Amino acid sequence: MPTSVEVYYDFRSPYAYFASRKIRTDSLRLPPTLAWRWRPVSIDILLNLQAGRDPWAPYADPLVPAKRRYLLADVRRCATYYGAPLGQAQTSSRPNPTTALCAALLLDQAKVPHDVFREAVFDEMWQARRDIGDPEVIASCLDRASLSRDILANAQTDEARGLLTDQTTKAYENGVFGVPSFVVKGELFFGADRLDMLAWRLRGELD
């Protein structure tokens, strides 16, 4: 049976975007039998759970100003390092990825291939810097992936939000505290900068 890697991601994470770019360009040089299982989770829910708050409590910025400045500089540096196109932010407001995450989750649960959709959302978020909280942007990503727009209405329901909450809570209970996280045979690797180490581990497992 092929080895699989669980990939926990949120579209709003630039590091998840960098990891997606690295995996999709096949720069890790791993066997094609390896299965990447992409699991959408909400980074806001993960942060709230860590702080003992309700999963959907209002966002509270966990970063001090110095770390926020470092993060912004690091994202630009990583974009160059990974060769990942990064557009200029059009606004300082935080995009709401909930509908996009719910759509990806529903497609995953229905076992509908949606790699193109997921990559399109990442590209809209980080290359085009469009608002992925806008349903029309998500609809355009579904169109690009030749998927029905019917999923969009379902992704905006309380039921879909509940599914996202459940998946994120379960991931947290299993040790996932941030994104991107990669889990293979119970071993956790956190961050896009751990992909090379993950590949090293997998090459040993698959040899």
Image (cartoon, rainbow, N blue to C red):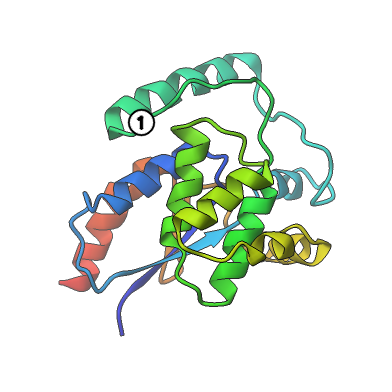
**Residue at 36% across, 22% down:** 77
Total of numbered circles in the picture? Answer: 1
Amino acid, disc 1 = Pro
**Position of residue 104 measured from the top left corner of the image (x, y, whole percent):** 57, 61
**Residue at 33% across, 34% down:** 84
Left or right side of 199 for 160: right
User: In front: 8, or 129?
Assistant: 129
Residue 2 in view here: yes
Residue 174 in view here: no
The correct choice, above or below, for 21 with respect to 32 in the image is above
Q: Which residue is the site of mark 1?
A: 85
**Residue at 71% across, 28% down:** 61
The correct choice, above or below, for 74 with respect to 148 in the image is above
**Position of residue 112 measured from the top left corner of the image (x, y, whole percent):** 50, 73
- Among the 4 quarters of the image, the one containing residue 158: bottom right
Q: For the N terminus, give its image quadrant.
A: bottom left
Left or right side of 4 for 129: right
- Among the 4 quarters of the image, the one containing residue 174: bottom right
Q: For the C terminus, give its image quadrant.
A: bottom left
**Position of residue 143 measured from the top left corner of the image (x, y, whole percent):** 51, 56
Q: Secondary structure at mark 1?
A: loop
**Position of residue 8 measured from the top left corner of the image (x, y, whole percent):** 52, 56
**Residue at 59% across, 74% down:** 109
Left or right side of 37 for 142: right
Mark 1, Cα crowd under 10 Å, few <14 / some 14-19 / many 20+, is some
Residue farthest to the left? Answer: 207
User: In front: 103, or 10?
Assistant: 103
